[in-house]
Image: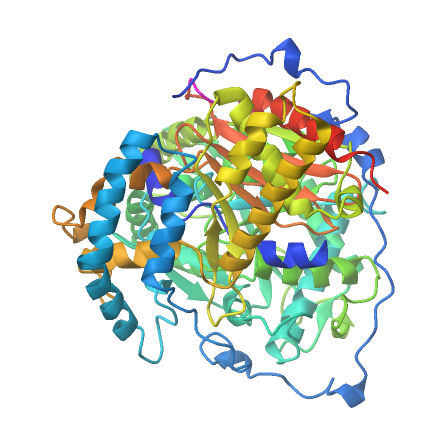
Amino acid sequence: RGARRSRALSASFGPLCLDTAAVHRAMSTRIRCGRQASAALVSPWVGLIDAPAGAHRSACPVLAAPQRRFMSAGEGANKPFYEFKKLYDHNHQNIPRLPIPDLDSTLDKYICSLRPLIGPSELAQHLKSVESFREDEGPLLQEQLIENDKHEGYPYSYVEKHWDDMYLELRSPITVHVNVGYSLADDVDSHKPNAQALRVAKFLISTFKFQRKLMSGMCESEPGGPFCMSQLGRLLGTSRIPTYGRDRLRYTPDAKHIVVLRNGFFFRVDVLNPDGSAILTLEELTRQLQWIIDKTEKSPTTDAEGGIVASGVGILTMEDRNLWAHHREALKAESPHNRGVLKDINSALLVVCLDRATPQTMTERSMHVLHGSSDELNNRWFDKFQVIADEVGNVGINFEHSHADGVSWNRWLTEVWNDMQGLPPPSGMTPLPGIPSVASIPGVDGPLRMDFDVPWALTAPIKATRTRAEALVSLPETRMLVFEGYGKRMCKAWKASPDGIVQMALQCAFHRLYGKMAATYESCATRTFFHGRTEVIRSAHSEAKHLAEVLWDGAAHRQDKEKVLREALSRQTQLSREASAGMGVDRHLLALKKLAMGVTPHSPPLSSLLAKTDDLPDMFQEDPFAYSQTWLLSTSNVTTSWNVIFNFGPVSDHGYGVGYLIHDDQVHINITCFKGSPETNSPVFAAALEEAFMKIHEVMGPGA
């Protein structure tokens, strides 16, 4: 039930943040599915479903970045752009506040979004409530919303408090339901004998260099901006602290150490010297990480009375948040030592998980970075950003999602990747600064093992947590599809948006399987506004439905299908532009609904949970409103050249979570659903999606 509440709350917002507008610019009745794909969906195409890791590596080599222009000193390279301690709350670029859309415009767009989803009679009845809201309660709420937004300080937008409340007041586990995973591309170090330690060491050194650049005020706004950079002020060194009712965040951006987990044991590794003036050499940091890999016993053990010796505490971060808060207080009360260990974890720049796993397929690799296998559940700390490395040499990141989104993750990781690979910095950016290196940190002999004093009273709760965690990670059915038929290059030859092509393929695949359209969330960044996070692109529009109805129609001419497809793409582009400009539907309706519940930007914590909903306007209480936000397709695109897997869990019991990356000649799509649903099946959906891609290719032709 807790997981279901998690998904219901998540459905208000969808999965995460996607800068779909930037991608556009850069690239110009339920049915039950059987557990096997039908023969009609078996494809002769060269796409790889559940491709072996080796096959993927040969199919998707790491591409060198093109030569970039370096900023010269004369362009202000030595003058800080901002003061770091003010980066979060000071609008140093003078970018505008997130606008509040016009009420009539939002309601008109909302009605349009319902037409492909709701039957005519039910829609007609609901429209009466929408028009009543437009004439009666709506204008008063809109006026109050505008008035409430006239203030300085937090919240910095009309929707920010509701966004933060949604994340931090969630009591269900954040594993699968909130956290997001990436997996980095292979590089020249991936197949070396010490790849696990070496790749992580390189990543860490470049990350500390990025943080040095960030804290010195030297991170430029990205080309095409200005874009809000406030998230960068709290990106690294942030911990989510479980507390009763509502979690809180703790920030340590100037951290000089990391925490490493191996077989469930915790180690503190100091990377910078105490004053931050020097960093461990690559060789020494690699040696220390390899020592942890080699010298750590296989797993925490139990004594004769069944008490846990040493560790196993990390699994508690997969627990219900109130239970985890209770257990954390018990750990703190047990000893000052435990309080010190927790402080070291919370104040680390990152957590590094050195796993024994050896994933052999892209699907296994995806599952490993999203939630881990049952053998690695002790080796996680989901309350912080985690760098996860397996013994095959794969390196991924699992993101705690409450305080940051994909555009900020990509900014950090793009600069880090280029630095790791010895490539020029991204366009319009300066290289990461050098930090003098040293072979040792004064007063530190190497990795410090930090074993918790686990009270006997916690042994049974930890065992119960393990049972629940094993059930949690068994919930998602994951399938990784590497579609090799075409990618960004061919879409551009068609003069079509690559992201639009993927979204229309998703719509057609779902309609092919279920005979209906799915309420679809595509995340879009609103980072041209101060503290802008995301808005929803409702991709299941009427033009997409028309396409889904004709794509497989053998009687329809190819030219007619192409016309319908281009109309659907045009509509998708229009909705994307509106969403990125803060003119979507969902954030505005959310704020109006919260206000109708009596929750204002300055209401105390937990106000939403305590508010009465019985006297809400009828529009918000009727089934079509809820159904339109039951995201059967929760989708997101965070395309970069260095990322090969992007995953997250579904936000509906009977829906799919679809993270995708559009490379030049491939599309990488990670599909998740819940095994307990009789209506969803990730392998079947992957096969249907591949067929939809092929049908679109038939319509559009081979390209130029």
Main secondary structure type of the part rendered in magenta: loop
Residue 93 pos. (x, y %): 55, 81
| Magenta region | 678-682
Above or below 545: residue 553: above
Label tally: 0
Quarter of the rendering occupied by the N terminus: top left
Report the residue that reaches farthest toward the top: 39
Q: Is residue 183 visible?
A: no
Residue 540 coordinates in the image, percent (x, y)? 49, 39
Residue 350, visible in the rendered structure? yes
- Is 684 positioned to the left or the right of 467 in the image? right
Q: Residue at x 61, y 48 (%)?
A: 570
Residue 275: quarter of image: bottom right
Which is more toward the observer, 464 or 664?
664
287 vs 569, left or right, is: right
Left or right of residue 304: residue 537: right
Measured along the vertical axis of the image, is residue 371 above or below residue 287? Answer: above
Instruction: Tell me residue 430's x, y (percent).
Output: 76, 74
For the rendered model, the colour scheme is rainbow
Q: Based on the picture, tell me whether residue 680 belongs to the magenta stretch.
A: yes
If the image is split into quadrants, where does the C terminus sit?
top right
Residue 347's x, y, as percent?
49, 63
Magenta segment includes 452: no
Q: Nearer the viewer, residue 665 or 394?
A: 665
Residue shown at 67% from the left, 68% from the top: 210
Q: Is residue 513 above or below residue 233?
A: above
- Answer with the quarter of the image where residue 23 lies: bottom right
The residue lying at 83 percent from left, 58 percent from top is 65
